Image (cartoon, rainbow, N blue to C red):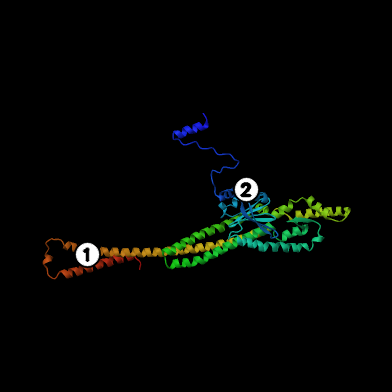
Amino acid sequence: MGKNQFSIRRRKKGMPPLPTPPVDNGEPQNSISMPAGTVKASKKKVGGARLWMRFDRWGQSELNEWDKNAIIKRAGIPTRDLRILGPIFSHSSSILAREKAMVVNLEFIRAIITAEEVLLLDPLRQEVLPFVDQLRQQLPHKILSKVNGTSAEQDDNEGHFPNAGHWLPVPEAVEGLQAELPFEFQVLEIALEVVCTFLDSSVADLERDAYPVLDELAMNVSTKNLEQVRSLKSNLTRLLARVQKVRDEIEHLLDDNEDMAQLYLTRKWIQNQQPETLLGTIVSNSPVPAAPNLRRLNSARSRSGSLVSNHFNYYDVEDLEMLLEAYFMQLEGTRNKILSVREYIDDTEDYVNIQLDNQRNELIQLQLTLTIASFAIAMETLIAGWFGMNIPCTLYHTHGLFWPFVLCLTIGCIMLFLVILGYARWKKLLGS
């Protein structure tokens, strides 16, 4: 049976015709329309690129969008270290030493520092901008002053170390590393300075807001003042936790010399350089004849080896220790300020509790006094109730006895009240 006959039979029976198959003309058939921005968003999510700012030791900076793989390849760090820089650990503090990099997560500063450059995450945030400004202001001046001090005697030296595309003399390079902090410690110092300054300003703002509120609460215990103190205590607790995290991280580094030695990235980089590469560069750049050049090579070999071995002790962490101790003491002072504010809050709360206890005691004394008065009045009411009964009594027929009886009964009740009140004072149940 042909296809046309089958379609005619379906139309006769009142059935709808079969759907016509699509014609394949080489053009794609779009069955579902998607918004234009959907594909871009999915690609961005898959790529995971984030905004980074790169600073080198010469003060040059640039903004780039790199994904995790690019950062891992560039800095030589494991993948788990990037999780520390993620939003989950945004309020944690850690300084981790790796073979070729230092991972820094201090409050809002999240960076990867190497011996040649620093990679800063989210550099356009409002809190990170002061750190970026300090990097731009301080790093070029420090490096230029160091280079100007060593370039005057560069021609008289025999060995050179490569340094970010520039060749520095071996003696001056080694002595310069001792005279000034390496690049990674300069960046770390700026980060600690910015973080400590931010925490100090936060504590100053807290102190400025805390003392007037606490004084107002001491004078007037109200719901509004209590709510302000509650909010103040919550802010103080969060700020103390942030200061404590940074302080504990620095204290952890100070307690372990091996961890501090791992942070010397420039020293490890120079120690990993091959002496043959250094001496080969000297020979290729020297215009002297072969025989003097051999003597020069031997002297340079012995001199460079002695310089590296003498000047670079692996556990010599005095510079970093002094740097960390300075900011540890500053954070300790900030922590003490917060603790003093908390002690002032505790003293104010104790004072308010004493006031409330005093008022409560006064209410109890008033209640006891009213209870004694009620007992005295109840005795008078009891006697009046007795005479209010319909019982025959000869006193009912005595004229002129009512008012003297009422007066004597009232005086008796007052005397009873004074006696019980005096007894309560004698037992020190009531205040004077």
Q: Position of residue 409 (x, y in %)?
A: 20, 67
Residue 333 shows in this picture: no
Mark 2 = which residue?
A: 79
Which secondary structure lies at badge 2?
helix
Which of the two residues, 333 or 20, is positioned nearer the viewer here?
Answer: 20
Which residue is nearer to you in this view: 130 or 274? 130
Image check: 226 left or right of 32? left
Q: Which mark is residue 266?
A: none
- Residue 202 or residue 165, whichever sits in front: 165
Question: Measured from the top left, where is residue 150 in percent x and y?
Answer: 76, 62
**Amino acid type, mark 2:** Thr
Considering only vertical position in the picture, is 79 above or below 407?
above
Residue 145 lies in quadrant: bottom right
* Left or right of 224 on screen, residue 423: left
* Disc 1: which residue: 380
Category of crowding for the residue at label 1, using alpha-carbon neighbours closer than 10 angstroms: few (below 14), some (14–19), many (at least 20)? some
**Residue 103 falls left or right of residue 387:** right
Query: What residue sits 23% from the left and 63% below the top?
Result: 379
Which quadrant of the figure contains the C terminus? bottom left
Determine the secondary structure under disc 1: helix
Query: In 3D space, how far apart are the residues under numbered discs 1 and 2 (Cα atoms)?
Result: 90 Å
Q: What residue is at 53 percent from the left and 65 percent from the top?
A: 205
Under mark 1, the amino acid is: Glu
**Which label lies toward us, 1 or 2?**
2
Of the numbered discs 1 and 2, the one sitting upstream in the chain is 2
Between residue 123 and residue 286, name the one nearer to us.
123
Please give the name of the residue rendered at 63% of the width and 59% of the height, measured from the top-left corner. 191
Residue 24 screen position, x and y as percent: 58, 39
Is 15 placed above or below 324 here?
A: above
